[in-house]
Amino acid sequence: MTLGLFDDAPAPYAAPKVIAPGAALLRGFALGVDEALLQAVEAVTAAAPLRHLVTPGGYTMSVAMSNCGALGWVSDRSGYRYDAKDPLSGKPWPAMPACFAELALRAAAEAGFDNFRPDACLINRYEPGARLSLHQDKDEGTMDAPIVSVSLGLPAVFLFGGLNRGDKPARYRLQHGDVAVWGGPSRLAHHGVAPLAQGEHARLGGRRINLTFRRAR
Ligand code: MD6
Ligand code: FE
């Protein structure tokens, strides 16, 4: 692959970019620990495989998901919920790797949210065409903690809207190593991911991995 003069190569982390009150992009924040994160993703998904969940409405999600931590986010015909057990195995979700918890804590603090101790990490795998429609993260038992979202692999267009579903979302290109944090007045902001474009990432090939950290209870 050749990199043209104006292609955006990963730059070292500089500073938060505030995109709304309580919401920031930390571009490149995870670059120093990306390989550790990816090795931990491989270990977690070997124990709790990525799978395509079914929505309460009966649609199969295009994003494949797994979890680690005390609680995992799941969806089936009966609804969305957090569950301490992986419904595929009946066993507890894998423990949250230390490098996950440490990065989430540091990223939240960088965005102004101290003492973030996530008890749930959703692992999402996007392949070309996979998308996540505009939604709010509102299945958590507390809205006091922020959401921390880490992007790895192929770039994606992140849609970040407002508190009302009708608010036109802004579009941000999230690259490998970028972290988005939203909490406080933006905790219930609508957000989503546009259909993933084809591409080739040096480490992950034709995929994007997203880690979404939450305090579920
Ligand atoms: C992202 N993901 O992939 C953002 N929310 O960049 C999410 O916002 C998300 O993947 C709820 C459930 C699954 C998700
Ligand atoms: Fe979400």
Image: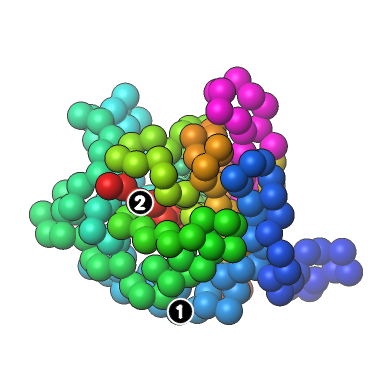
Q: Nearer the viewer, residue 156 or 81?
A: 81
Q: Main secondary structure of the magenta part?
A: loop
Element at label 1: helix
Residue 166 shows which numbered tag? none
Closer to us: 85 or 213: 213
| Image x and y of residue 5, in percent | 89, 69
Please state which amino acid type lies under the numbered disc 1.
Answer: Ala
Seen from the viewer's position, the closer of residues 151 and 59 is 151
Splitting the image into 4 quarters, where does residue 142 fall? top left
The stretch of residues the image draws in magenta is 155-170
The residue positioned 33% from the left and 72% from the top of the image is 97
In this picture, residue 111 sits left or right of residue 146 = right
Residue 89 visible? The answer is no
In magenta segment, residue 48: no
Crowding near the residue tagged with mark 1, few <14, some 14–19, many ≥20 C-alpha atoms within 10 Å:
some
| x and y percentages locating residue 3 in the rendered image | 80, 71
Q: Which residue is mark 1?
A: 36
Q: Secondary structure at mark 2?
A: loop
Pick the front one: 79 or 63: 79
- The structure residue drawn at horizontal position 39% and vertical position 35%, both measured from the top left corner, is 138
Q: Quadrant of the N terminus?
A: bottom right
Q: Amino acid at mark 2?
A: Arg
Labelled disc at residue 215:
2
Q: How many marks?
A: 2
